[in-house]
Amino acid sequence: MLSLTAAASVLVFIPSATIPFIYSKVSLIAIGGLISLALFILARLTRGNIIVPPIALLGAFWLVPLAYALSTLFSGAGIRAGLVGTELETDTFGFMLILAAFATLVALTFRRSNQYRTFFKVGSIALGLVAIAQIIFFILSRVASTKFAATANVVGSFADLGMLMGLYITLSLLAMRFLTLSSRTRKFTWVLSVLGLVVLALVNSALIWTLVALTALGLFIEAIMRRGSTAADEDFDGVSILSVESESAHDSDTKGLAAPLGVLVISLFFLIGGSTIGASLVNAFGANYLDVRPSWQSTFDVGSHTYASSPLFGSGPGTFGTQWLKFRDRSLNDTVFWNVNFTSGIGLVPTSFITTGIVGVLAWLAFLGLFLYIGIRALLFRAPEEPFARFVSIATFVGALYVFILAIATVPGPVVLLIGFFLAGLFVSSLRYGGSRREWGVIFARNPRVGFMIVFGLTLLLLASVVAAYVVIERYLGSVAYADASQALAAGDIVGAETALQRSVLFAPSDRAYQLAAAASINQMQKIANDSTLSPTQAQQQFQAALSSGIQSATQATQLAPNNYQNWVILGNVYQTVVPLKIAGAYENAKTAYTQAITLSPTDPTLPYALAQLEIAQGNSAAAVTDLTTAIGLKRDYTQAILLLSQLQVQQGKAAEALQAAEAAMYFAPNDQNVLFQVGILRLGTGNTDGAIQALSAAVDQNKQYANARFFLAVAYANKAQYSDALAQLRAIAALSSDNAAAVAPDIATLVAGKNPFPPSRQGALGIPQTGVKDTSTAGASTKTAQ
């Protein structure tokens, strides 16, 4: 059952937008583990005994979950968040408990050679199917690139796929070196290894190539050392020979030499040429992907701030994202990743150091230290004598170590972590074959007192597994319902979204579900405000109901997760929606919510920008200018804030300052049609007609249907007496729609008569005059799509 669960977690996926991809795998892992636990308990209760391999490393599996449990209880981040998070993320107590339980069950249940063979056989078949499926995805991405992506896979992220392929190549090298494989099995291993190398080349990860290269190098050196001398004895006539005999000193078998050498050469080839040849290969197949994480320095910075306030138990499981928003460097706002809210640091283990504090650091160091000490000592001095058992010990130790190194340097997905801990459990299980073949057991059926305690404990554990299975299924159904609601709301089906959200909250209340419910209420209020078919009484009643529902949902979100700034933002958005209606308390509540969000994410420029929009709705232009200045100070190229500041300065009669702000926005966004339009209007209003023509022409180049830009470009041309150019722009506007044709007809007639239809009395020096022009672009003011 355990092997099938591991294989299924790799292969199973449901191609549906409403089925959470990764969470489906995590839920499958959890349910498979719980079923395996229940079957193990029933088997032990039936047989009346428990047999345990060497226990030191078995107990070490539970050090990290213990640290997560302590942090969940005492960090103050909330038990619900620390226990399961949103979808049993890897940095939660629940997921760490699953990993430890899997490793323990594997160590307890795998005792015979045929069980190990079954695991490796099932695993090879599963990874073979993954590799074949990936090659098919690559081919389909070339044939139908609009429907299939080269990076699509059945494992998880593209990086996770590379990690699994690297693990398979590592284990296959060990198998070809230490096992006598049949011709059929050896061919299968070679073919799958070649496919894995192809996938690795497209993933193009230096870390994975390095780990594979180190394994190949070690096996190559080991194979060379075992070959023994092939020189003729007469070469040493008259030479004193120092001979060191070993059991394989004269073994001339070259088995396992070609494979590690070939893999080593290929690995070094891509390590050296990863940025050139590797990148070219990736681009050729369209397999580009982003694996963006905070740097080591950024992770340490967040950790140092966290330890300053919560050193012992950290910030709490699953809270790295919260700490990142509080303590990230403002300079990141000048990069393309300024609005990425990272939920983990450079690696899983460093992230855990931050979220679980000193207890987590000690737990990880103790676990990894014991694993290395016991593993290396066992392989050097107590390796099993039987060849297959020796291979199992070596392969599972190296495979688990491979995953643990990945967990330190990067953030593997749940499937990769499961396989790693599965291999660690297999290694512990294989220790019973080493040295004196020690293992111990308890026949509790023969001892009433001990038997009662063990049976009682196992029964409680069995019942707990049933409850845990119910919770996993319930939360999974809640996540599916949330996905349904998101899709319905994106399609404009507010009623369907609200129905799905009710199911989601019923199964598993979460702040994200209440966030979405509040967003649905905002959409509902806007829909009601624009619905002319409702009577005033009906509109008022429905609007009040939607407002009340939105406030209630957003408030509930802030109560479930008070440290999530997005919950406060959605609460502010609900209140801001009704600020123009002068509803008592709306402005004050919105400002309080936005201020709390800024406290939780002080370097996010979008928050003072939202606060500025609130002040504008309230009529506080001076306060809005202050907030916009703050936003621009956090992100110098924040064009939305710069453009809004320019518009406010226009209203205040500060034409020069407004033009300066708009031109600053154009510097950072030279192809933004809105910015170009604003610059053109301001230049036109300040007498820089040539500059206005340049900016407005650029805006028209970006959007040929930008009617407002064409109209004011015509004004600029007319001011320079270039009537033919002005006439061309107005006729282009007229061709967009019949309404536009009617609106500009008098101006066209005036231009045809050789006169300027835009005297100074008609032109607005600043802002956008009301010309009656209907704009067919999304950038204009009042728009109408040309038929």
Image (cartoon, helix red, strand yellow):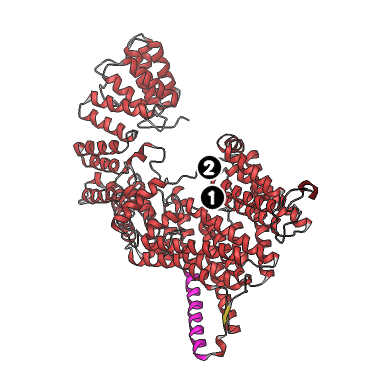
Does residue 517 lie above or below 273 as drawn? below
Pick whichever, 317 or 236, lies toward us: 236
Q: Is residue 307 left or right of residue 5?
A: left
Query: Does the stretch in magenta take in 461?
Result: yes
**Quick check: can you spot residue 772?**
no
Q: Is residue 24 left or right of residue 755?
A: right
Does residue 209 lie above or below 58 as drawn? above
Query: Three-letter amino acid code at disc 1?
Result: Ser
Q: Quadrant of residue 715?
A: top left
Task: State the image coordinates of residue 175 (x, y, percent, origin top left).
Answer: 68, 57
Query: Three-letter amino acid code at disc 2?
Result: Tyr
Pick whichever, 422 or 666, lies toward us: 422
Task: State the image coordinates of residue 556 (x, y, percent, origin top left).
Answer: 32, 60
**Quick check: can you spot residue 678?**
yes
Which contiguous range is marked in magenta? Answer: 448-470
Give neighbour class at mark 2: few <14, some 14-19, many 20+ (Cα, 10 Å).
Answer: some
Task: State the image coordinates of residue 145 (x, y, percent, origin top left).
Answer: 60, 39
Q: Earlier in the sequence, mark 2 or mark 1?
A: 1
> For the residue labelled by badge 1, is the local secondary structure a helix, a strand or a loop?
loop
Q: Quadrant of residue 1?
A: bottom right
Cβ atoms at labels 2 and 1 below 8 Å apart: yes
Give neighbour class at mark 1: few <14, some 14-19, many 20+ (Cα, 10 Å).
Answer: some
Task: State the image coordinates of residue 109 (x, y, percent, origin top left).
Answer: 60, 73
Q: Which residue is mark 1?
A: 157
Spatial CA distance of label 2 from label 1 is 9 Å
